[in-house]
Image (tube, rainbow, N blue to C red):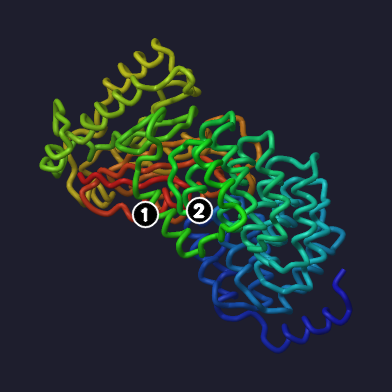
Amino acid sequence: MIRPFLAILIGFVLLAAGDSELVAEFRRYYGKDKSPVQRREAVLNLADENSLEATQVLLEVFEDDEYLVRRAAIDVVGDYRDEVSARWLLDEVLLDRKRSRNKELVACTAEALGGMQHTFASDALVDLLGHRDLGVRLGALAGLGSLGGSKVVSPIVALATDPGTEDAVVIACLNALGQIGDGSGGEPAVLVALQHSSKQVRLKAVASVEELHLKAGVRPLIMIMGDDPDPRVSEDAYEVLRAITLRKFEDDMDRWLAWWDRNEKSFEMPDLEKVAAALKTIAEEGTRYNAGAKSFENIQTKSDNIIFVIDVSNSMSEPFGDPERLKRSGREYKSLQRLEIVKEELINTIQTLSESTNFNVVAYATGVDVWKKKAARASILNRNNAARWVEGLRPRGGAAASFRERMGHASGVSDEGRTNTYLALMTAFGEDVDQRKPNAFVTKITDPVDTIFFLTDGEPTVGKTVDMVEIREEVARVNAFRGVQIHVIYVGAFGGKDFKQLADQNGGVFISIGG
């Protein structure tokens, strides 16, 4: 029920103003007869409205079948600052007996309401942390992270440190604490999470030590680097240690401990700008460890769960554009064709994988082919079989395409030779791209893959979406509780900015080797 004073106020506002011309046009335009891209664009057109009528019409979009459309509506409403709109959302959805039964609507509203930055919403969002629906709790945490304030830190920490809290919720708690930026308040949750049984939780906790600038996290990170049972976690701990201490002792736990024992009391955390610069340097180095690592195109990892995703679109048939660079590298290849060079490098990498590694290979153009239905152990027979499979890959789509054809503006390339970046990434994550209404939050993690090597030579030209902003948003959705690192090797002759952002946003390294 709407509170009486608010109902009077809302009625007065509506009588005085009515729908704006833009909102009225949105009501006429928005519908299931429009494509998801069109619906999303229409939602984004309301970004500057900041009004009750715009909030009301966008509330309906929170139930759209397409996640990217819902995501746009949440972001737009979350950027509004109109207090009447925020109170209407609170009363009409979160406090209304009928609408509050719609779990997805409540989850989306909670996140948007937190973004609106009105502190009167904090109590209602905190109350949702005890909701029986997982999606609602995750939406409330996303909202609290945006809302911020010291008042909400304690309940988030209590939830994160409760032994019965689901892994995804613990990760969401750490995400919220990182957004709020209260290091001293969030420290207990991070320290407990560093010892969590879930690899995904530990990966997030390691990142949280850097995000919250926690000196108390240094010693636990040293121990994780040396003792964690999962090499990806130890790898991340090493990188964060280097960034927050500005020291480089390789992955030598004894040396790190000896240094910390001598310096812990006097050590002062470097300022955030220096940490950011250190992280940038580490990412640009490409090489992560001196020994015991797997390497593909100069990017090294200790991960034991890897997927290689290789572009075999039509343009991969073109010759490598900088043969002088190849000469300087000291490597000799049987062919200068882009795909042939990539295949040689990948086969060399596969043959050096240790038996403890689980891996798979995805080749993509318009569609995708996978070596195995799921990742396989890198036994000598599997390595040999994968190498033969890679050797058999050929560029799709016939003769080399012109620039306009590669960009999808002409019909000279057969349909099978275009670049479906969205499908390739979702396949690597094990996601069903045909799912009609994916959840706003991905919570069921069955695939152990934690590292993706993604090789491409250009922007997407076909697929459910070819907009790299939308593709990165979808990756963010499915990777929210997985901690998968995405390394990008870009072999295009120009560009690559979008793919650098993809790597940066997912903890990976971006390397452009020219095309």
Name the front one of labels 2 and 1: 2
**Camera-side residue of 330 and 333:** 330
Horizontally, residue 190 falls left or right of residue 334, namely: right
Horizontally, residue 83 falls left or right of residue 419, namely: right
Q: Position of residue 191 (x, y in %)?
A: 69, 47
- The span from disc 2 to disc 1 (Cα, nearest Å) is 30 Å
Amino acid type for the residue under numbered disc 2: Thr
Q: Which residue is mark 1?
A: 498
**Camera-side residue of 431 and 252:** 252
Q: Residue 362: in sight, yes or no? A: no
Residue 141 in the image: above or below residue 442: below
The residue at 48%/45% (across/down) is: 239
Q: Position of residue 229 (x, y in %)?
A: 59, 28
Horizontally, residue 363 falls left or right of residue 225, namely: left
Q: Quadrant of the N terminus?
A: bottom right
Please tell me how crowded label 1 is: few (under 14), some (14-19), or many (20+) other residues with Cα within 10 Å.
some
Horizontally, residue 292 falls left or right of residue 399, namely: right
Amino acid type for the residue under numbered disc 1: Asp
Q: Position of residue 427 (x, y in %)?
A: 47, 34
Q: Position of residue 73 (x, y in %)?
A: 60, 63
Residue 157 in the image: above or below residue 299: below
Q: Residue furthest front?
A: 262
Name the disc covering residue 161, or none. none
The secondary structure type at the circle numbered 1 is helix
Q: Residue 501: in sight, yes or no? A: yes
Q: Quadrant of residue 114?
A: bottom right
Q: Which residue is mark 2?
A: 245
- Mark 2 or mark 1: whose residue is earlier in sequence: 2
Residue 320 in the image: above or below residue 57: above
**Camera-side residue of 391 and 489:** 489
